Amino acid sequence: MNATSQPEHSQDPAESRLTEHWVTDEGIPVTLRSISPEDVAISKDFLAGLSFGTRYFRFGRGDFQYSDDELRRLCTPAPGERAQFIAVARCDGVDRMIGSARYVVETDGRTCEMAIVVNDAWQGHGVGRRLMRALIEQARRDHLQTMVGKVLGSNAGMAEFARRQGFDVDDRTRPGLKTIVRPLGP
């Protein structure tokens, strides 16, 4: 699913929002954008469509589900405290979320903890890479210095993805858990 893309940045400086459009080799239009309060339904469908294994690797439980209230909060991130981007594919005339990446600013105000998940069918097609790039760019605009994440020790695919995105992977912090760390300097 290679693609051509056209990144756009909002003209409103108060909204440092990134939107990127591309079309896959199969002709499927995809948009990467900030999440919005209107995305609760597609977020719920997205999570329900993830395999047990993908949910396990992302949430630590294969049967994980957010409540409707949690989804509403997640779809309304507070600028400066958290950011979330989603990738949406237009399939058969219907918008379907195919990936999500977010971070939350830690109490030190310089570090953020990230999380990312991509629909099973779209893994390995560049969606995660584009989401991660958008997340890193937003963290830099928010003047954050370090991005961190937690990866289950058995999730070798995510550890390798993180390395390719410039993260150091440390598996010595806690048994069964890897910590990924990426400085956000220029």
Image (cartoon, rainbow, N blue to C red):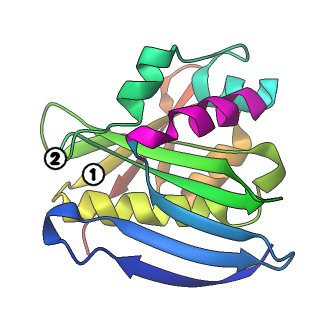
| Mark-to-mark CA distance, 2 and 1 | 7 Å
- Residue 68 versus residue 159: which sits nearer the camera? 68
- Residue 29 versus residue 59: which sits nearer the camera? 29
Image-based side of 88 in relation to 137, left or right: right
**Residue 3, can we see it?**
yes
Residue 146's disc is 1
Q: Quadrant of residue 30?
A: bottom right
Instruction: Give the image location of residue 14, x and y in percent.
Output: 14, 63
The reply to whether the magenta stretch includes residue 41 is yes
- At a point 80% along the width and 44% down the height, the residue shown is 120
Which of pointers 2 and 1 lies earlier in the amino acid sequence? Answer: 2
Q: Secondary structure at mark 1?
A: strand
Instruction: Give the image location of residue 18, x and y in percent.
Output: 38, 68
- At a point 51% along the width and 33% down the height, the residue shown is 40
Q: Amino acid at mark 2?
A: Arg
Q: Residues within 10 Å of mark 2 (few under 14, many from 20)?
A: some
Name the residue tied to disc 2. 110
